[in-house]
Amino acid sequence: MKNSRYVARSTAIAARALGNETMVMSATNSTLFTLNEIASVIWAAADGVTPLDQIVANKICAQYDITPEAALKDAETLVEGLAAHGILLVSDQPLAGPANSRGVAL
Amino acid sequence: MSGLIVEMAAKALKLNIPLSVQLDLTYRCNERCVHCYLDHEDHGEMTTAEIKDLLDQMADAGVFYLTVSGGEIMMRRDFFEILEHARLRTFCIKLKTNGVLIRKKEAHRLRELGVVSVQISIYSHRPEVHDAITKMPGSFRQSIEAVRLLRKHRIHVDMANVLMIHNLHDYDGVKALAAELGAQFIIDPTITPMMDGDRSILSLNVDEDILREVFHNEALAGNVEEFCAVPQGPGQEELNSLPCSAGHTACYVSPYGDVYPCVQFPLPCGNVRRTKFVDIWRHSPQLKEVRSIRLRDMPACSQCIHGGTCTRCPGLAFLEGNMRGPSSQDCEKSYARTGIPSENLKRRKSPSQHLQLVQIQALASGADNNRFLEISIAK
């Protein structure tokens, strides 16, 4: 059985919801990203203590017409991409929550 | 501007979200720059708690870009406490400071707090010229040291060179200094009136020969042929365009909680001590009026050949007496770029007006057809 992965928003970012999208800027190199609606749901739920597969099951599969396997695969690709830019932290162990859980209007 | 930023701004405009706010923490300052548009007194600044609450409100309203300015921001003892709160609310934080109070410890802290950029005004590469403008001996050395420290901490630094009669030949020197320090060079050839409307400091503005020199300098303007091209006059698209982001996706908050469309547009729209920030943003009649204005609503500018390409500042126009009128300083810039006078300049420079010292004339103030008196003083 595959181990759960945990994701947390970095504190070295600027972020804000803009409609159903999210703007995220890395404070280390000022790279700007926009996350679409579904990526924004994962971003907002990335509290460091909820496993990614649980986020996908509860927040994505419950609301969108997609299989858990496909959704998890897409979510893993997303978090790896964001982690590579240092704006999301990924770990096999629970992470301390982000400094601000209100950074993005839920 | 990148495509993504343009896209974000368009979305914020559609959703009526204040994407950018400049928040001045104080008007107090340790320098006394000859061209400053502010007084330097404390008339009742917001407290730490009030500012933190405002930051919460602004984050909830959708503000992303937060420019923290003054006065000198580090004159506030709670500056870092405020900045920590801004970081907690995940703003994209930019600072404007003279840098005089930035030492190793402060530079390190700014890096820790994820400040994206710091703008520091450097008036000349010659210490004596810079210090004469700031009226603070040693300020050049201290500001340059701040630039070095910030760059050492890999913080982006904009070195802003405000052009005026005291430093009109020094911009090349400042540009070279910025390159040496790894900072971005910004030149600003406009001295603006004081916020209380006092226009006396406008006498520090450089003349049209220097403006022309700056605008035709490829190292500063880029593609001069394009930048200084003869305009074609506004088309339908331009006539329906917005003047600038002031009041549309951006606004300014003073140290006393007053909300304005922009720091250069002193039209009071409300006060956050009495009204929630988001309610001022959404419901202020003044902001609604600003938002209603398109180029087609400006009697002079819509008829001007520069209408579609001018950098007209609605705040400067407001300070001249009519937010739907021309901004003469921008008319002068358009003339310096292209050699073609604007409709406003032609009117101002007509012989009949030179004969009068003071002219009082009634102007239509746009769609609501209110009329008021504008007093122009011909020199």
Image (cartoon, helix red, strand yellow):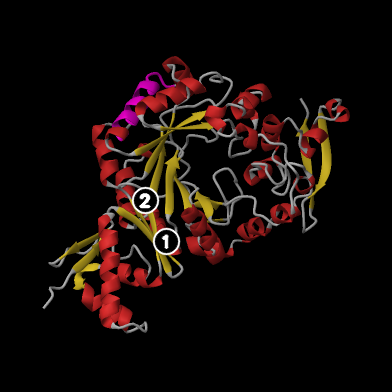
Residue to which mark 2 is pinned: A31
Please state which of residues B85 and B271 is positioned toward the viewer in this rendering: B85
- Which chain hosts label 1? B
- Secondary structure at numbered mark 2: loop
- The residue depicted at 39 percent of the width and 56 percent of the height is B55
Seen in the picture, residue B55 relative to A46 is either above or below; the reply is above
- The residue depicted at 66 percent of the width and 58 percent of the height is B289
Residue type (three-letter) at the residue carrying disc 1: Gln
Q: Is residue B229 left or right of residue B251?
A: right
Q: Position of residue B239 (x, y in %)?
A: 72, 54
- Which chain hosts label 2? A
Q: Where, by quadrant of the figure, is residue B269 drawn?
A: bottom right
Q: Which residues are magenta?
A: B136-150
Tell me how far mark 1 sits from mark 2, CA to CA: 25 Å
Q: Position of residue B267 (x, y in %)?
A: 61, 49
Q: Position of residue B358 (x, y in %)?
A: 81, 31
Question: In the rendering, which numbered label is found on residue B57?
Answer: 1
**Quadrant of the drawing holding the N terminus of chain A:** bottom left
Residue type (three-letter) at the residue carrying disc 2: Thr
Please state which of residues A9 and B179 is positioned toward the viewer in this rendering: B179
Seen in the picture, residue B149 relative to A8 is either above or below; the reply is above
Q: Is residue A43 left or right of residue B217?
A: left
Seen in the picture, residue B157 relative to B206 is either above or below; the reply is below
Q: Is residue B36 left or right of residue B122?
A: right
* Main secondary structure of the magenta stretch: helix
- The residue depicted at 35 percent of the width and 50 percent of the height is B48
Q: Is residue B149 magenta?
A: yes
Q: Is residue A17 left or right of residue B274?
A: left
